[in-house]
């Protein structure tokens, strides 16, 4: 596939991530920090997010298995997860974090468990979509600065 076609496909995938509500403006701000000196900046940040957040998810799973649930600890973990998700523009994941925190405040273990399952689904879906996006971006190669979308 020629580079122009790859870049067009990449732009379509990127736009679909916004149109489907997976990403928000924060992702665009990360892209604006990427330059010729660090052409893989966004991918590196997202990779760090997934590395660090996988540990957080494990901690949340462990907290959800405790009886009785420690809603304060769970809320603190969710606060941290929401912050890191916000930093990469993971809109749906952030929304699920907000919902789970509301269930923590309400003391609803069932709501926490149900929302955590949805959160993991959104997290995994976004991860797969971003992995495909970055793989295609590597194939398409760097875009010349004059052509980079603003």
Image (cartoon, rainbow, N blue to C red):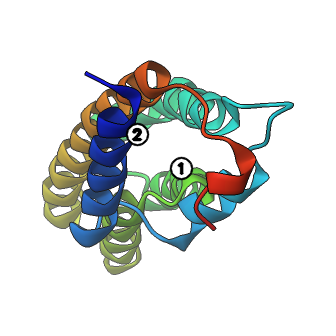
- Report if residue 19 is visible in the image: yes
**The residue positioned farthest toward the right in the image shown:** 37
Q: In the visual, does 126 lie left or right of 110?
A: right
Secondary structure, mark 1, is helix
Quadrant housing the C terminus: bottom right
Secondary structure, mark 2, is helix
User: What separation in Å lies between label 1 and label 2 (alpha carbons)?
Assistant: 7 Å
Local packing at callout 2 (Cα closer than 10 Å; few below 14, some 14-19, many 20+) is some
Residue 125 higher or lower than 88, as above or below: above
Judge by depth and name the residue closer to the eye, 55 or 146: 146
Quadrant housing the N terminus: top left
Residue 86 higher or lower than 34, as above or below: below
Total count of labels: 2
Query: Where does label 2 land, which residue?
Result: 60
Query: Where does label 1 land, which residue?
Result: 77
Q: In the visual, does 131 lie left or right of 48?
A: left
Q: Which mark is residue 32?
A: none
Q: Residue at x 51, y 35 (%)?
A: 53
Residue 14 picture location, percent across and down: 36, 53
Residue 60 picture location, percent across and down: 40, 39
Judge by depth and name the residue closer to the eye, 52 or 25: 25
Q: Residue at x 49, y 61 (%)?
A: 75
Judge by depth and name the residue closer to the eye, 17 or 78: 17
Q: Residue at x 58, y 57 (%)?
A: 76
- Sequence-first tag of 1 and 2: 2
Residue 85 higher or lower than 43, as above or below: below
Judge by depth and name the residue closer to the eye, 95 or 2: 2
Residue 73 picture location, percent across and down: 53, 52
**Location of residue 65 by image quarter:** top left
Q: In the visual, does 97 lie left or right of 73?
A: left
Q: Are marks 1 and 2 in contact (CB under 8 Å)?
A: yes
């Amino acid at each position: 596939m020629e580079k122009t076609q790859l870049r067009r496909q990449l732009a379509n995938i990127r736009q679909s991530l916004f149109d489907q509500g997976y990403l928000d403006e924060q992702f665009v701000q990360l892209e604006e920090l990427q330059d010729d000196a660090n052409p893989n900046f966004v991918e590196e940040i997202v990779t760090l997010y997934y590395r660090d957040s996988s540990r957080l998810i494990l901690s949340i799973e462990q907290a959800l298995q405790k009886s009785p649930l420690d809603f304060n600890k769970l809320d603190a973990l969710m606060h941290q997860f929401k912050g890191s998700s916000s930093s990469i523009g993971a809109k749906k994941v952030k929304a699920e974090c907000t919902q789970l925190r509301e269930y923590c405040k309400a003391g609803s273990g069932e709501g926490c468990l149900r929302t955590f399952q949805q959160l993991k689904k959104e997290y995994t879906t976004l991860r797969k979509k971003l992995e495909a996006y970055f793989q295609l971006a590597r194939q398409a190669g760097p875009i010349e600065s004059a052509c980079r979308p603003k």
